[in-house]
Image (spheres, rainbow, N blue to C red):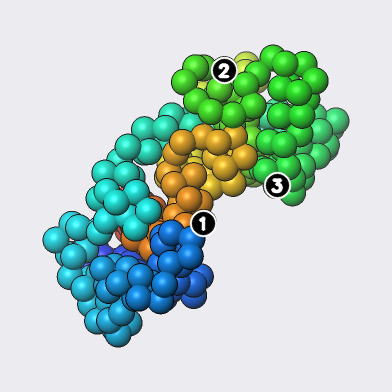
Amino acid sequence: MKRFIVKRLGYAVLSLLLLSLTIFLLVRLTGDPSVLLVEPGASKEDLVAIRVQLGLDRPIWVQYGQFMSSLARGDFGHSFYYRTPVLELYLSRLPHSLMLAVAAMAFSLLVGIPSGILAAVRVNQWWDSAGKIFALLGLSLPSFWVGLVMILFFSVYLGWLPSSGSGTALHVIMPAFALGWYFAAAHMRLTRSAMLEVLGSEYVKLARLKGLPEALVIGKHAFKNALIPVLTLAGINLVIMVNVAVVVETVFAWPGVGRLLYEGISFRDFPVVQATVLIGGAMIVIVNFFVDVLYAVIDPRIRYER
């Protein structure tokens, strides 16, 4: 078990190192940030002074070495645009993203799990067909398109919900629906597959032969076991929701981490983009690491297969 954990930990560290190098190089392909920071009509000397001030005049490998050295001390640098520590900026936006992700996850589970159960119990009937259509629409319609349609209908035509911003429960409804739409379809498909597999197992057949009520067989014996992979996926999806809701937060002007990333890219704010991507990547890598270890604890065969 120790060898398995050390091996998975090595993969996790290597993944983060590759991510740090990739994002460090990619942001520098977007252009020179000093052009966006100087006053209109500034001279070449002003541009050079800003580049020196930001440390962009040094060779790229020196910049990367300084970046990793600061990162090892927990310092993500200062924002070029906001002139504040990046970590403070990230932590100030994180509660908004967590609120949106929790609301979107609640919506996706409340819709995805019951519809998946119904599709599995009524397999090859109209409930199953409706579930397949829902899953197809959920996985194929982009979240920004869903968000724009909702703004047009509920804000512009009906005037029921605010189209942007945050502060009240009404502000959360449309962004949570747009963000959770895709994940509801994913949870529905996984619940249906897991339920179909469990419903065909021997112990469920035995429970039916004993004459137990169908609701008890489905609710106690089938659903309880089918829920394990769904909850595992939901935990990973919650982390993904916090960090990749860039489009939804931009469409609804939601002041979360995704919008911070969008602002960082727009202003060529290298430290903001690097920190946001790295923290998000670290969250996903850590969650995957613990899921792998948990699987190895539950099923010892995994330790020897990988």
Label 1 CA crowd tier, 10 Å (few <14, some 14–19, many 20+): few
Report the residue that reaches farthest toward the right: 126
From mark 2 to mark 3, how far is it between C-alphas? Answer: 22 Å
Instruction: Looking at the image, tell me whether mark 3 or mark 1 is earlier in sequence order.
Output: 3
User: Of circles 3 and 1, which is in front?
Assistant: 1
Instruction: Looking at the image, tell me whether mark 1 or mark 2 is earlier in sequence order.
Output: 2
Horizontally, is 124 left or right of 293 in the view?
Answer: right
Tell which of 267 and 24 is nearer to you. 267
Residue at position x 30%, y 41% in the image: 91
How many numbered marks appear? Answer: 3
Tell which of 297 and 37 is nearer to you. 37
**Quarter occupied by residue 22:** bottom left
Instruction: Looking at the image, tell me whether mark 2 or mark 3 is earlier in sequence order.
Output: 3
* x and y percentages locating residue 61 in the rendered image: 29, 83
| Residue corresponding to mark 1 | 266
Tell which of 59 and 102 is nearer to you. 59
Image height of 253 relative to 173, above or below: below
- What residue type is disc 3 on? Pro
**Quarter occupied by residue 20:** bottom left
- What residue type is disc 1 on? Ser
Circle 2: element type: helix
**Quarter of the figure that contains the N terminus:** bottom left
* x and y percentages locating residue 302 in the rendered image: 37, 62
| Residue corresponding to mark 3 | 142
